[in-house]
Amino acid sequence: MIRLLNVSTMPPGTGQPILKNLTLTVPQGEFRWLLGPSGAGKSSLLRLLTLETPPSAGQMEILGISIGRGASKGTSRAALRNLRRRIGFVPQDYRLIGDWTVFDNVALPLRLRGASERDTRREAFAVLEWLDVAHLADKRPGSLSGGEQQRAAIARALIGRPELLLADEPTNALEDAQARRLLGTFQELVDMGTTVIVATHNEALVREAPARSIIVRDGTLTADPQIQDSFAIRPSGEQS
Ligand SMILES: Nc1ncnc2c1ncn2[C@@H]1O[C@H](COP(=O)(O)OP(=O)(O)OP(=O)(O)O)[C@@H](O)[C@H]1O
């Protein structure tokens, strides 16, 4: 469950809020598209939800944990660290560590949790295979194509079986078939009780899997005109 009540964010040096008075609830196990024009605040909202940017005002609760103003002031560091490990994030710029292999990048969330090397290998290869990049496990990210890097970043976000998955434009470097396959993965996660929020400009993808949307404009939320009951992938070829 995500709950925001009148939340604003003001990253250091900005002087004014980027996100203003956001009030929002997303129940556990639901899917939301995160939509809005370029510069509207989608990435900023995801950074708030991944706890990278603390709220500057308002109240916020993520996966049952209340996040205080200034983050570290209101919630203990240990609680924030534990909470971060329950969240999977696919950043727009992938943020793969260039000196590490794809395998080590993808394994990181499990290693941070203290998983055994055997479990880490098994899980890492399972997600790498699922995303069709297992053959690249020993390569460095710099030698991969954009789409391969994006799939490695998605694998890293999925490996810990997160309770909350946040993805920033996760299909912009993917081919259509891969993007459609990713929709299937989102569906599986939602079926398992994961909350999934995906920022995208890909209107065709949204048409293919209509769902409720969080719509951001100028740092505020606007109403979703097309309320869908639940995330549902349309059979191929069906038109809206
Ligand atoms: N750290 C920061 N300092 C100053 N301004 C920022 C910062 N982060 C974001 N902004 C500004 O906040 C606004 C929202 O940016 P954000 O990246 O969240 O938009 P977006 O909806 O994700 O855009 P896009 O679809 O192009 O990725 C923009 O005007 C951006 O310049």
Image (cartoon, grey):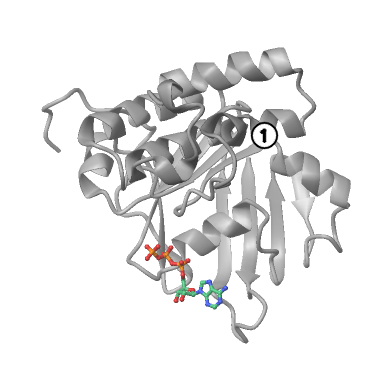
Q: Is residue 138 left or right of residue 117?
A: left
Q: Residue 235 at what x, y percent from top left?
A: 19, 22
Q: Secondary structure at mark 1?
A: helix
For the C terminus, the quadrant is top left
Where is residue 69? Give x, y as percent. 77, 66
Is residue 11 visible to the viewer in this orientation of the structure?
yes
Q: Which is more toward the observer, 205 or 110?
A: 110
Number of numbered discs on residues: 1
Q: Amino acid at mark 1?
A: Pro
Q: Quadrant of residue 116?
A: top right
* Relative to 69, 62 lies left or right: left
Please give the name of the residue rendered at 64% of the width and 60% of the height, measured from the top-left corner: 5
Q: Is residue 66 above or below residue 82?
A: below
Residue 53 versus residue 240 in the image, above or below? below
Residue identifier under label 1: 109
Q: Position of residue 73 (x, y in %)?
A: 86, 64
117 above or below 114? above
